[in-house]
Amino acid sequence: MIWTASDFISAVNGVAVGNHDQNAMISGLAIDSRQVKTGDAFIAITGEHHDGHDFIPSAMTKGASAILMSANTDLAELRLSDQVLYVQVDDPMKGLERLAVAARNRHQGTRIAITGSVGKTGTRMLVAQALAAYGKTHFSEGNLNNHIGAPLSLARMPKDAAFGVFEAGMNHAGELTALSQFIAPHIGIITQIADSHSGNFPNLEAIALAKAEIFDGLVNQEQRLAILNADDPFAPLLEQKARDAGAERVIRFGYSDIAEHQILSVKRQQDGLAIEANIRGEAHHFKLGMMAPHWAKAAIIALSVVDALGLPLEPAKAELAKARDLPGRGARSVIRLKKGPSEIKITVIDDSYNAGPASMVSALSSLSSDPQKGRRVAILGDMLELDRAADKHAALAETVEASGISHLITVGEMMQHLNSAISVPSLRCDHAANAKSAFPLVLSALEDGDLVLIKGSNGMRLSELVHNLSSAIPHTNGDSHAA
C-alpha cells in the first residue's frame, strides 16, 4: 500500500464522486491501462496521441481501485462502481504532479537523482541494488525519467522507503531544473557528458550546463552532495555549478588521480568484472556481475553513494557481484538457431535501447576485448538526435576497423555513411534500411560461435531484431532488479 484513499484525495486536491470506501488502499499507480494491476489507481492523462479517459473502462476491468480523472468527465458513461474510488481534478497531469510533491514531502529517507549523457539507467540500477542492502529502496523503473515519468516514479514511492533513486533525462535546456525540483534530491549525480541530443544544443558545454540543472533541486540541508566524473573535461564546470546550487560536498569518481573514489584496475572475467579501487585512501577489491568495462564507473558511483551516507561498503559490494546486464543495455543471450540442416549457437549482446558516439565507441571497444571466443559481428543502427549526423556516423569507421569485427551490418539512413567509410577489405559490410529488412541479412551472416553486438537508438527498433532472433530457443542470463 502506498496511499490510503483519503490521503490520495487530499494530495491531488481532488473531489471524490459516487459511492466509495474512503478507507480503501491504493497499492500502485498506472498511466497505461494495459499495465494496471489489482489495487492500482489509474491516472487518466491526456497525451499527444491518446486520452487516458478513453481507457477508464479497461482500467476498471483490470482491477483498478481508484480512477483519477478530469472534472469534465461524463460520469453517466462510466457506469460507476461502488468498489472503485473516483476522484476528479482540474487536470489529471497536475493531479499526478501534486501527488508526487506529497510523496516527496512525506518521505523521511534519502533521495538520489541521476542524470548524464550515457549510463543513467545502469547507474540507477546499481545504486538502487547497492542501497537495497541497507533498507527499503524505491527506484524509478524502465525509462520513466521525463516530465511524466519522474513525477510518476516519485508518486509511487512508499512513505517508509529509506532510499529513493530516480533517473532524470532531458532533451532541451530547462527540463532538468523542473525534474530536480520535483525530486528534491539529497544527492545529485552526473555520470558523463557526451554527444547526445546534440541536435538541440550548440555544443558540449551547453549539454553540460543543461545536465548541471540536476543540482537545482538539491535539498537545503547539510548532507547536500554532488557526485561527478573526474575524467570528464567538464568536471570543473559541473563542480562550480553544483557549488552554486548549494552542494556542501562534491565527490569525484573515475580513473583520474584527482578522484577521491578512484578506479585502479578493471579485469574482465567470464562472469563479470574484477575491480580494484581506492576509496578515500583505502584499497577495495570487488566484483561486478556485468560484462562491459564501462560499467565499472557505475559501480564506483554506487559505492560512492554508500560511502557518503556513512554506511559500510561490504554489503554493497556483495550486491554488486549479483548485478546483471539489463535488456536493451548489454544483456547477453545465448541463442540456438536453425541454419540449413544444422543448428548454430550464437551470443547476442542486446544494446538496442540507446546510442550516441561515446556509447558506440564504448560498446565496440567492449566487444573487441570480450573474453568470449568466436567471430565478432556488429549490427549498428542510426544514432538519432545528433547534429552533423552524417560526419559523426562516418567517424565511427576507425573504431569499427580497430575492433576486430568480421562482419558489419549497418541499419538506417545515417549508418550508410559509416558503411561507406569502411576501408578494410577483409571486413565484410552489409546495409539495410530498417530492422525488418536487416533480419534476413543477419540470419545469412551468422555462424556458429558468433558474438553479436546489436546497438542503435531506440527509434531504430533494433529491439525487434533482438526479439526475432531470441524467438528461436533463447537462454538468457535474466533481468537485474534491486530489492
Image: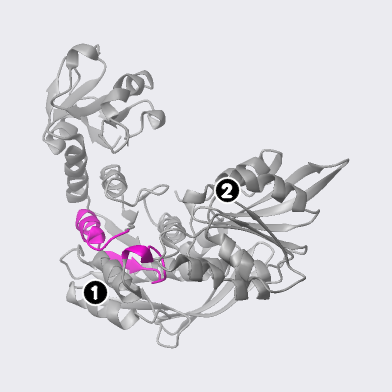
Residue to which mark 1 is pinned:
242
Quadrant of residue 302 within the rendered picture: bottom left
Any mark on residue 434, and which?
Answer: 2
Residue 98 seen in render: yes
Identify the residue shown where x is 64% and y is 48%. 438
Neighbour tally class for label 2: few under 14, some 14-19, many 20 plus, Cα within 10 Å: some
Identify the residue shown where x is 36% and y is 33%. 32
- Please tell me whether residue 468 is drawn above or below residue 225 in the rendered image: above
Residue sitting farthest toward the right: 341
Q: How much space separates mark 2 and mark 1, taking CA atoms?
A: 42 Å
Residue sitting farthest toward the bottom: 257
Any mark on residue 323, and which?
Answer: none
Quadrant of residue 177 within the rendered picture: bottom left
The quarter of the picture where the N terminus appears is top left
Frontmost of labels 2 and 1 is: 2
What residue span does the magenta drawing correspond to? 171-200
Q: Nearer the viewer, residue 264 or 456?
A: 456
What x and y, as percent, mark residue 301? 42, 69
Please indicate whether residue 24 sits to the left or right of residue 407 in the image: left
Instruction: Say whether residue 196 is magenta.
Output: yes
Q: Which sits earlier in the primary sequence, circle 2 or circle 1?
A: 1
Identify the residue shown where x is 31% and y is 51%. 146
